[in-house]
Amino acid sequence: MSEKKPKKILEYSVECPVCGRSLKVEEYLYDMPLVGKVIISSGKCENCGYKWNDVRLAEVKGPRKIIVEVKEPDDVNALVVRSSTASILIPELGVEITPGPASLGYITTIEGVLLDVLDKIDFLCREGEAPPETCDEKKNLIEKARNAEVPFTFILVDPEGTSTIVSDKARIVPLDKRRGREEK
Ligand SMILES: [Zn+2]
């Protein structure tokens, strides 16, 4: 483990996306074990309490797609650094997480992403936005995927090249620079 402490490198203000007042953001450079140098930004609006967080690689890699085929239980422990501009796609599970205007960046694992998806399904089901049969079916599928009983493809689409997945199985596909998407 690295003993280096996060170092504050920048402080600036942006407009709070909730109330429009000033939101102070602080950026820290952190040398993260296994990942390398990352920049962690965090801010909190003094007026409405809105919190914003992001994380990105300090060294920009260029637009790319990072793909992990999950087949064994250990595969879901791969560390995921997801910048606020990156999308997560899992075609076999019907999962699509795309960045919105107030999107947050985070560091988690593939399993952490699945747990997040389960939370969201739970929320939608409680709100009555999905029929109960679909809810159970979806939750079962994600639970099985979490134990690698259902193999799936975890795709991180990273138009800015500031995200990564720490796994021996990670495959990197460069994206078209002008369009920020892969040519079909
Ligand atoms: Zn605010």
Image (spheres, grey):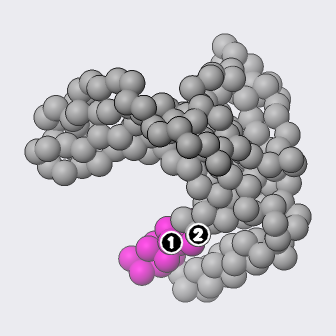
Kindly check if marks 1 and 2 are in contact, taking CB atoms under 8 A apart as contact.
yes
- Residue range in magenta is 117-130
- In the picture as drawn, the residue positioned furthest to the top comes out as 178
Measured as percent of width and height from the top left, residue 163 is found at: 63, 36
Does ligand 1 reach within 8 Å of label 1's beta carbon?
no
Residue annotated with mark 1 = 119
Nearest the eye: 17 or 9? 9
User: Residue 138 falls in which quadrant of the image?
Assistant: bottom right
Q: Is residue 5 left or right of residue 78?
A: left
| Figure check: 79 above or below 140 | above
What residue is rendered at 65% in x and 27% in y? 161
Does ligand 1 reach within 8 Å of label 2's beta carbon?
no
What residue is rendered at 42% in x and 32% in y? 7
Total labels: the figure holds 2
Q: Residues within 10 Å of mark 1 (few under 14, many from 20)?
A: few
Q: Amino acid at mark 2?
A: Leu
- Disc 1/disc 2 C-alpha distance (Å): 6 Å
What residue is rendered at 63% in x and 22% in y? 60
Measured as percent of width and height from the top left, residue 52 is found at: 34, 44
Residue 126 within the segment the image draws in magenta: yes
Q: Is residue 115 left or right of residue 42?
A: right
Element type where label 2 sits in the image = helix
Residue annotated with mark 2 = 115
Nearest the eye: 16 or 6? 6
Q: Is residue 15 visible?
A: yes
